[in-house]
Amino acid sequence: MLFGSLAGCAPDMRCVKALQLTLAVVKPDAVAHPLILEALHQKILQNFLIVRKKDLMWRTEESERFYAEHAGRFFYQRLVEFMSSGPMRAYVLAREDAITHWRGMMGPTKVFRARFTAPDSLRGQYGLTDTRNTTHGSDSVQSAKREIAFFFPEFNADEWMLREEPRFRLGLTEYNEERQIHTLQDM
Ligand code: UDP
Ligand code: MG
């Protein structure tokens, strides 16, 4: 299942398993188009609880540091320049199996493959090229931890898991239209 209700959760979003956090980024190619950005936000809302959201722009150094694992690859320079070419939007998202679910929604890295093998995926629908491919998503628990800290240094994921996850899991949240994130209901 690609989009739809939260797997393992009741319709009111009450979940049994612990929630997992992941980092999702809307890349500059998609942020440049307000209607695409809004469509992505709505798809995220249908699939995740939004724990944090931030609009930002990178300098070249941040782009290089974030993608250091790809240094030396043929596309590295192009990637680094693209990711610091315009505004981005980053999210900390929560649900069961958040990492795998978001990667599944994104579709394959290469846009031309995505268009053929996963036409309904985000990259299949909105991706422009192998570099300008709409979104980023963490690919493991370790990278989610590192990448969330990279984008949201002020956010303490361990603390959130301890103090807020139980109530998020029980569905004791509300969507704050102004901040465009989910917050805990007043007790
Ligand atoms: N990329 C590219 N050309 C390639 C492979 C990757 O420009 O042939 C870019 C693309 O923007 C991709 C990013 O480098 O999202 C990171 O690559 P990775 O293999 O980690 O793909 P992802 O995890 O984003 O699917
Ligand atoms: Mg990757």
Image (cartoon, grey):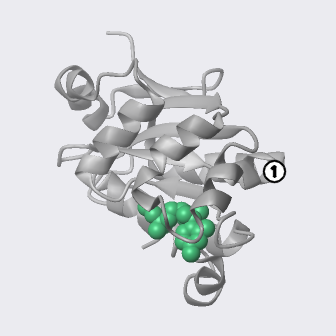
Q: Quadrant of residue 179?
A: top right
Q: How many numbered dots are placed on residues in this image?
A: 1
| Screen quadrant of the N terminus | bottom left
Q: Nearer the viewer, residue 47 or 107?
A: 107
Q: Nearer the viewer, residue 129 or 117?
A: 129
Q: Residue at x 70, y 53 (%)?
A: 82
**Image spot of residue 162 (x, y percent):** 17, 24
Q: Residue at x 51, y 38 (%)?
A: 91
Task: Work out whether 146 lies above or below 115.
Answer: above
Horizontal side, residue 151 vs residue 37: left or right: left
Q: Residues within 10 Å of mark 1 (few under 14, many from 20)?
A: few
Q: Residue furthest top?
A: 187
Q: Quadrant of residue 74?
A: bottom right
Name which residue type carries label 1: Leu
Horizontal side, residue 125 vs residue 157: left or right: right
**Image spot of residue 154 (x, y percent):** 40, 17
Identify the residue under disc 1. Answer: 35
**Image spot of residue 172 (x, y percent):** 33, 27
Q: Nearer the viewer, residue 9 or 132?
A: 132
Task: Work out whether 107 lies above or below 155.
Answer: below
Task: Work out whether 92 lies above or below 96.
Answer: above
Q: Residue at x 18, y 44 (%)?
A: 18
Please indicate, yes or no, whether residue 51 appears anywhere in the rendered image. no
Q: Residue at x 60, y 68 (%)?
A: 75
Please indicate, yes or no, whether residue 25 appears anywhere in the rendered image. yes
Q: Residue furthest bottom?
A: 116
Q: Residue furthest front?
A: 72
Answer yes or no: disc 1 within 8 Å of ligand 1. Answer: no
Helix, strand or loop at mark 1: helix
Horizontal side, residue 157 vs residue 62: left or right: left
